[in-house]
Amino acid sequence: MATNKTVFFLIGILLVVLGVSMLAPYLIQLLYRENNHAFVSGAFVTIFIGVLFVLANLGNEFKLNLRQTFLFSTLAWIMVAIFGCLPFLLSPEEFTLSDAFFESMSGITTTGATIISDLDNSPKSILMWRAILQWLGGIGIVVMAITILPLLKVGGMQLFKMEGPDSTEKILPRTIEVATIIISTYLVLTFFCGMLYWLFGMSIFDSIAHAMTTIATGGFATHNDSIGFFKNSNIEIIASIFIVLGSIPFISYLKFVQGNKNIFFKDIQIKGLIYLILISVFTMFIYLLFINYESSVFDKIRISSFNVISILSGTGYVTDDFGLWGNFSLIFFLFLMFVGGCAGSTACGIKIFRLQMLFIFLLNQIKKLIYPNSVIITKYNNQKISDDFISSVIIFIFSFLFIFLIISMLLSISGLDFLTSISGAASAISNVGPGLGDVIGPNGNYKEIPDLSKWILSVGMLLGRLELFAVLVLFFPSFWRN
């Protein structure tokens, strides 16, 4: 185990940060006079274990090789989910172990699926902790997507490798340097989002909680009716804008700070996201006109825009029960769940760039049929793309859909109906939150589904958040051989 000292040292640091973060909901407990010590106890245990990890794994030099980086990526999320569920278990709300772990995993993976059936009457401290978990999960996956996943070459993520050393042995100093700028950007976006929420009608508590879950594209809300509770079109517009800002690659913000002022207009992936949003909103708007949805033209545009952006990004905020709009809306939103946002953002799903690469691959195959002797050079964002790279993207998409089918079958076996199984699997692996149907749809939650289903969905959330292969590779014996 000596070779993994750096892994457990870093996990210890994460647990200390997580434990310190639990003190914020404790202040909420004091402010709202909630008489329990769940967060103090949880913080003490988490910090204590984290410090033990740090002290037990101190060394003169910290290095991560490729195998250790894979191990750290998965263990970090699992450990944070485990200790993140302590406040739920210790709270007077009587969470079961399955419910607490599900809620914690949903938070840290920014999924937004919840087992809490009455958010309006839940303790403010619990609501704030859910928001903090999503906020931490959002910044965690951004840093990981920019610094770790490209080195692991997971599903084409090497395309987004930052300039710098290729060796994973030098990942730590580079991660700290990049993370500083990324976290600063993340904080600024969160601040302005919360400020605008407050200015346009939210309470201070609601604006802080929703700002964190908006930028993280997580979707945990503080009311049963989600964003629809506020019945405020300005709040929906603000949410849509900041969800999009959270769904574009944070590496773009980094490049903008470094002097590339046109990055937001030139990046093919960002343009692809905007085009997809516009096409999807127009499609849903026409559909609402076609079914004679009872609202004004402006409201149809607003409702279409908000729900498309929320589902596409994996945020999962809702204002209307789109499950009542007919079968087309169910199929359409299921498709959007799979797509997701941009690579290197807080959004999940297959990602825009992979679908763009798949489209390029299909075009090239057609060209080769027409011109068999032609030499085709594939480029993406002015970078030359190898055949191996395209293969890795196609394999990822196939694996994503294959694992989705496996999760769907397991959920069906665990006792869920067809629509709940299909949409639940899609929601988990795409980290969206709400599913479709009466049970886990926009007006439902995951409270009443069997415990086995909750554990299956928790695994699906982890797989989706960590891009599948970062987790799956750990189950191959050859991975552990020296």
Image (cartoon, rainbow, N blue to C red):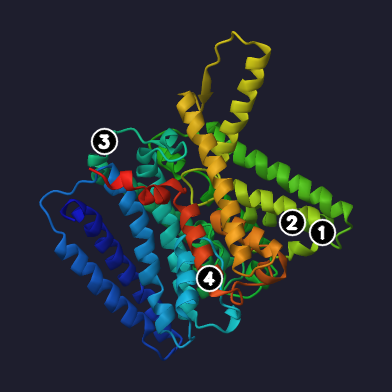
Q: Tell me, yes or no, if residue 159 can be seen here.
A: yes
Q: Are marks 4 and 2 in contact (CB under 8 Å)?
A: no
Q: Secondary structure at mark 3?
A: loop
Q: Secondary structure at mark 4?
A: helix
Q: Hey, what amino acid is under mark 3?
A: Ser
Q: Which dot marks residue 452?
A: 4
Q: Position of residue 141 (x, y in %)?
A: 42, 52
The residue lying furthest to the bottom in this view is 35
Q: Hey, what amino acid is under mark 1?
A: Gly
Residue for badge 2: 330
Q: Tell me, yes or no, if residue 194 can be seen here.
A: no
Sequence-wise, the earlier of marks 3 and 1 is: 3
Relative horizontal placement of residue 22, taking residue 307 as reference (left or right): left
Q: Secondary structure at mark 1?
A: loop
Instruction: Calculate the distance from the C-alpha at mark 4 to the C-alpha at mark 1.
Output: 30 Å
- How crowded pointer 2 is (Cα within 10 Å; few <14, some 14-19, many 20+) is rated as some
Q: Position of residue 363 (x, y in %)?
A: 64, 24
Q: Hey, what amino acid is under mark 4?
A: Leu
Q: Which marked residue is nearer to the observer: mark 3 or mark 4? A: 4
